[in-house]
Image (cartoon, rainbow, N blue to C red):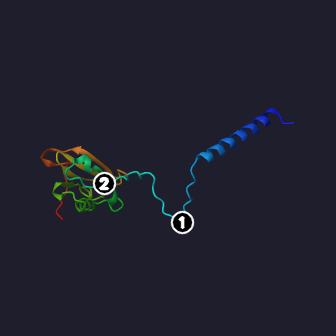
Amino acid sequence: MIGPTASRRAGLVVLALAVATALVGCTDTPDPVPTATATLTPTAEAPPTAEAPRLVPEGDASANLPYFAQIVQSVAAGPDVGRAYVDALVAAGFDRAAMQVTENQSTVGNDAESIQFSVRWGEECLIGQVGPSTGQPVTVVMPGLAAGRCLVGNTRPIDW
């Protein structure tokens, strides 16, 4: 004898099979399964990919921060010396004449705990800081200082 629970399950199974059979009858012929040699055509447009950061000469400092940060990050794997950052930024299209960089060594001859470098961009500055005391490279946009400077204190000449 089949109990009420078993009878109800059997009824649900029959109902599910009936619905599935009805749905199969409503569809067109199934698409062929693609093989390794078949070429699939997209049915929807692929989402746009993010554009890599680039120099935006007509943009402000904030528009150029992603590119500046990318260059700084790429140099960060090497030795933390100011010249490496300046050279990489110049190669990426930033104006050497608009740059400042701090010394690689302290006044007593030890390696600097961090170095800073900057690019003046209009009334603003792209500033980077790297070194053992900062951990990961830091890049920011800050207001420019008087006389076209970005960094406070002594900086070294960029004469190479």
Say which quadrant the N terminus sits in.
Answer: top right
Give the crowd class for mark 1: few <14, some 14-19, many >=20 residues within 10 Å. Answer: few
Q: Position of residue 159 (x, y in %)?
A: 16, 63
* Amino acid type assigned to the residue bearing label 2 in the image: Pro
Marker count (numbered):
2
* Amino acid type assigned to the residue bearing label 1 in the image: Ala
Of residue 84 and residue 12, the one placed in the foreground of this image is 12
In this figure, which residue is indicated by the disc labeled 2? Answer: 53
Q: Residue furthest top?
A: 4
Of residue 65 and residue 55, the one placed in the foreground of this image is 55
Q: Give the vertical position of 14 relative to 76 (above or below).
A: above
Give the crowd class for mark 2: few <14, some 14-19, many >=20 residues within 10 Å. Answer: some
Of residue 4 and residue 126, the one placed in the foreground of this image is 4
Of residue 140 and residue 152, the one placed in the foreground of this image is 140
Residue at image position (17%, 47%) is: 122
Q: Give the vertical position of 56 relative to 23 (above or below).
A: below
Q: Does residue 125 appear anywhere in the picture?
A: yes
Residue at image position (21%, 57%) is: 94
> Hey, which quadrant is residue 82 in on the image?
bottom left
Instruction: From the image, state whether disc 2 or disc 1 is nearer to you.
Output: 1
Q: Does residue 114 appear anywhere in the picture?
A: no
In this figure, which residue is indicated by the disc labeled 1? Answer: 36
SS for callout 2: loop
Q: Residue furthest left?
A: 147
Q: Residue furthest right?
A: 1
Q: Position of residue 101 (x, y in %)?
A: 22, 55
Q: How far apart in space, not on screen, are marks 2 and 1 (Cα)?
A: 37 Å
Q: Position of residue 70 (x, y in %)?
A: 32, 55
SS for callout 1: loop
Residue at image position (31%, 53%) is: 69
